[in-house]
């Protein structure tokens, strides 16, 4: 087994134990933690049993319910440094990579605010389409290369290199490459808090 897989397994196990411990110390039932975090009771139960790995957003919401950072939630030694580096070749931050789209997470896992930062690359003719996120969610996309069409429910615009668009993401939305080459840019997702 590779060290990367072992590290991921250890982090999942650490998170499972940490959520259980913090919930009991706080005197929360699963239902109360669900209400405080906005995470379903069944998902919290699966996390505590080590049967589910939460997304960054879910982990942030759990940490916020306990009034701690994600770093404190996972309680890993690397969170003690004042500088967190995400290396370009770190496969654990590669969210998606296929012929159509490549998404790399640029956000540190212990960010205290409900924000996510991604590097996006979309093939010609392909699109990154998303269902509605939580109410109040917004996205800011800045195009570094190519041409894209942004659609947020009934609204649409076209971006060229250097343009940015800020739009609702609590409705169905998409970023479609309308150029001849790969479209590349940066996406910031913010959650109402």
Image (cartoon, rainbow, N blue to C red):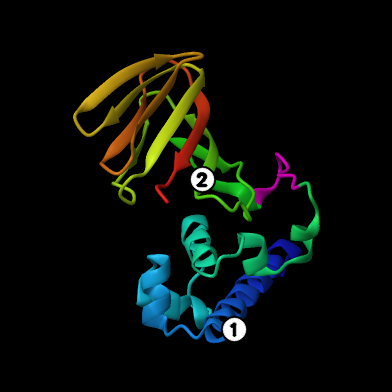
Residue carrying label 2: 115
The correct choice, above or below, for 53 with respect to 101 in the image is below
* Position of residue 166 measured from the top left corner of the image (x, y, whole percent): 39, 28
Disc 2 crowd rating (10 Å Cα; few below 14, some 14-19, many 20+) is: some
SS state under label 2: strand
| Residue 105: quadrant of the picture | top right
Magenta span dominant secondary structure: loop
Residue 183 visible to an observer of this rendering: no
Which comes sooner in the sequence, label 2 or label 1?
A: 1
Residue 68 visible to an observer of this rendering: yes
Residue carrying label 1: 21
Q: Which residues are magenta?
A: 84-91
The count of marks equals 2
Q: Disc 2 and disc 1: Cα gap in Å?
A: 26 Å
* Position of residue 46 measured from the top left corner of the image (x, y, whole percent): 44, 78
In the picture, measured across the screen, residue 98 lies left or right of residue 2, that is left
Q: Residue at x 43, y 35 (%)?
A: 100
Disc 1 crowd rating (10 Å Cα; few below 14, some 14-19, many 20+) is: few
Query: Which quarter of the figure is the N terminus placed in?
Result: bottom right
In the picture, measured across the screen, residue 165 lies left or right of residue 151, that is right
* Position of residue 182 measured from the top left corner of the image (x, y, whole percent): 49, 22
| Residue 69: quadrant of the picture | bottom right
SS state under label 1: helix
The correct choice, above or below, for 53 with respect to 144 in the image is below
In the picture, measured across the screen, residue 193 lies left or right of residue 13, that is left
Q: Residue at x 51, y 38 (%)?
A: 102
Q: Is residue 171 magenta?
A: no
Q: Residue at x 26, y 42 (%)?
A: 171
């Amino acid at each position: 087994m590779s060290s990367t897989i072992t590290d991921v397994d250890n982090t999942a196990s650490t998170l499972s134990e940490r959520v259980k411990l913090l919930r009991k110390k706080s005197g929360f039932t699963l239902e109360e933690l669900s209400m405080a975090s906005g995470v379903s009771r069944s998902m919290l139960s699966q996390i505590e049993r080590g049967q589910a790995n939460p997304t960054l957003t879910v982990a942030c919401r759990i940490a916020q319910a306990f009034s701690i950072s994600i770093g404190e939630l996972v309680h890993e030694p690397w969170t003690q440094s004042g500088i967190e580096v995400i290396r370009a070749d770190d496969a654990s931050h590669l969210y998606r990579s296929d012929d159509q789209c490549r998404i790399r997470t640029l956000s540190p896992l212990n960010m205290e605010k409900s924000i996510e930062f991604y590097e996006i690359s979309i093939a010609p003719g392909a699109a990154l389409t998303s269902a509605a996120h939580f109410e109040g969610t917004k996205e800011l996309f800045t195009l570094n290369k190519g041409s894209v069409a942004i659609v947020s429910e009934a609204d649409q615009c076209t971006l060229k290199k250097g343009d940015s668009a800020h739009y609702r993401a609590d409705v169905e939305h998409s970023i479609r490459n309308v150029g001849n080459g790969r479209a590349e840019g940066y996406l910031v997702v913010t959650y109402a808090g």
